[in-house]
Image: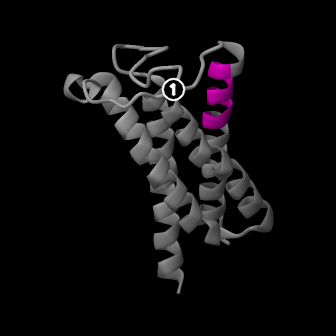
Amino acid sequence: MNKRQENALIFIAIASLIATLGSLYFSDIKGFVPCTLCWYQRIFMYPIVLIAGIGLFQRNVQIALTTALFSIIGGMISLYHYGIQKLPFLQESAPACGSVPCTGQYINYLGFITIPFLALLAFILIALISILMLKWQKEMK
């Protein structure tokens, strides 16, 4: 593993850790109850912390495919969740999400930054770096 790949693994580990700690802050400290779609996003973000951490410890860049898949699927959920928060035509057909509506916005910084937006940003960054790592692996063969 070269320095560029190691830095990419570190970036993925840090980005996923920040996203995980951010979600725990919002739910456990601020008291925001996660909706069902928030839980699905967590299901895809939380393992990335472990996968990237283990990959870094083992110096294993092969985890890039796994982190790419987890982040792409999680990102699609985040994008949909953000859409039903911000697009009126999607809000009307939004599914019921249990005790907390998925259209609710606990935060709305600058009129567009919501919790699903923050998750989407993290998933996009992780996916981009993971895809770059896969490209670098291909070039090294």
Residue at the spot 46% in from the left edge and 71% down from the top edge = 135
Q: Which residue is drawn at 53% across and 87% down?
A: 141
Q: What element carries label 1?
A: loop
Query: How many dots with numbers?
Result: 1
Q: Position of residue 3 (x, y in %)?
A: 65, 64
Q: Main secondary structure of the magenta part?
A: helix
Percent across and percent down for residue 136 are 50, 72
Q: Is residue 60 left or right of residue 82?
A: right
Q: In this view, does 90 lie to the left or right of 38?
A: left
Residue 75 percent location from the top left of the image: 44, 45
In this rendering, the answer to whether 38 lies above or below 14 is: above
Q: Is residue 24 magenta?
A: yes
Q: Which of 96 and 84 is in front in this view?
A: 96
**Image quadrant assignment for residue 111:** top left
- Left or right of 77? Residue 60 is right
Single out the residue that lies furthest toward the right. Answer: 57
- Residue at image coords 51%, 20%: 100
Could you tell me which residue is drawn at 28 percent across and 24 percent down? 91
**Which residue bears the numbered disc 1?**
98
Three-letter amino acid code at the position of disc 1: Gly
> How has the structure been colored for display?
one colour
Q: Quadrant of residue 70?
A: bottom right
Where 60 sits versus 7, above or below? below
Neighbor class of circle 1 (other Cα within 10 Å; few <14, some 14-19, many 20+) is: few
Q: Nearer the viewer, residue 72 or 12?
A: 72
Identify the magenta region: 19-27
